[in-house]
Image (cartoon, rainbow, N blue to C red):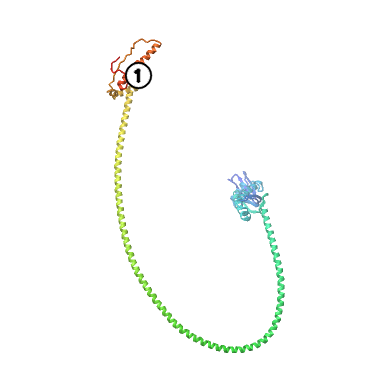
Amino acid sequence: MYKVANPSEYLVITGIGIDDIKLAKKAWILPGQSFIIFDMSPVNYTFEVQAMSSEKLPFMLPAVFTIGPRIDDIHSLRKYAKLISRHDKLSSHVKELVQGIIEGETRVLAASMTMEEVFKGTKEFKQEVFEKVQLELNQFGLLIYNANVKQLVDVPGHEYFSYLGQKTQMEAANQARVDVAEARKKGEIGSKMREGETLQYAAKIDAETKIYGTKREGEGRMAEIKVKAEVKVYENVREAEVAEANAELAKKKAGWAKEAQVAEVEAAKAVALRDAELQTEVERMNALTRTEKLKAEFLSKASVEYETKVQEANWELYNKQKASEAIRFQREKEAEAKKALAEAEFYARQQVADGEFYAKKKEAEGLMALGQAQGAYLRHLLDAVGGNYAAMRDFMMINSGMFQEIAKINAEAMRGLQPKISIWTNGGGEGGDGGANGAMKEVAGVYKMLPPLFKTVHEQTGMSPPAWMGTLENSHSSN
């Protein structure tokens, strides 16, 4: 089947033999292939976008966008064919898609601008919205052919633009009242000025007429007087010219005499002035010569003193530097000697410490080896006596001579005590009676035991019992 699309349409073919999709104006549709035809004509979308400025002021932005597929880019046409072509361009799906993009970008842009910036910069605002919306539409292969942003409209309950219009109207009305008052003032002032100018002009004409008549009269009289005056003037001029010539001659004679006297005086004064100038120049040169001489003397003297002091200072500095270098060298050598001595002492102490450490280490190793050997010996001995710890202990005590040492220590302790043994009898051997007699015998036995006890204490310590308890015999016989 052979299909041909209209001038404003495209064929979208897919199926057998086509990997993705194929766009064409005309093509054979083979079995196993399907196709659709989509219109590329742009469509007008009218919206009223509700947005809010950065001052939290809501407003309505009516806008009309003319949007359609990008026909000059095959990649964009492929996007449009895949994503949009199955839907009618006037369907709610496409309209909601476009409206969502436009509203989102418009609200984001409006939130970053003040109401005044949005209102005054409508052109820039429109361009910003156009560019941002176009970036989003690129992913669907769509192109904005035209965008028309209408005047901003107030949201019900927020009459910002209404108040702004009322403000403008009031300002225009007030300005009109001011202009009317100003025009009325100028009209009244102009009317009065015109009336005054008319009266002034009429009076001026009357005055000029009177002046002209008087002038004509005066001109006639003046002509007559002028002729007489000219005659008289001519005569006077002639007389004046004669007098002036005489006066000029006398004036010139006086001037010549004055110039001669002034020249003589100026010559005399010039000679005196030149003489004074030369004298002053001579004195100045003499003073300058004396000053230069004194300067040379003081300068030479100061130079000599300066050179002398500089040499002395250099010599003292040299001596001090050499002395300080000698002291520094001596201290460096002393420090080096002390350092060498300290290093030698440290080395000697380190060697001694190493020797002691080695000796202690060897001693510890010997004790450790001895302990290990004794431990092995004790384990062997314990095994030999069948695990009898008491037998092993007695053997160790006998083997080490501990019993002999104990007997010797006890004998040394008893030596010098010289004990005295006293034997007392209290008539014992009688048969015991029962009842009260048996108890009394026990008490009597206790009392019979006291005398030998006191005597033994007296013999051992020298202490005697109290007098109320009795006295001891001096003899050592036994009862």
| Observer able to see residue 194 | yes
The quarter of the picture where the C terminus appears is top left
| Label 1 packing within 10 angstroms: few (<14), some (14-19), many (20+) | few
For this rendering, which residue is in front, 107 or 133?
A: 107
Q: Residue at x 30, y 34 (%)?
A: 363
**Residue 340: where, in percent of width, then height?**
29, 47
**Residue 356: where, in percent of width, then height?**
30, 37
Q: Residue at x 32, y 27 (%)?
A: 376
Picture mark count: 1
Q: Residue furthest front?
A: 468
Q: Quadrant of residue 385?
A: top left
| Observer able to see residue 2 | no
Which residue was labeled with disc 1? 469
Q: Secondary structure at mark 1?
A: helix
Q: Quadrant of residue 447?
A: top left
Q: Residue at x 70, y 81 (%)?
A: 214
261 above or below 473?
below
Amino acid carrying mark 1 in the image: Met
Q: Is residue 437 left or right of residue 5?
A: left
For this rendering, which residue is in front, 431 or 363?
A: 431
For this rendering, which residue is in front, 41 or 254?
A: 254
For this rendering, which residue is in front, 390 or 140?
A: 390
Q: Residue at x 71, y 75 (%)?
A: 203
**Residue 85: where, in percent of width, then height?**
63, 47
461 above or below 315?
above
**Residue 13: where, in percent of width, then height?**
62, 47
Q: Quadrant of residue 374?
A: top left
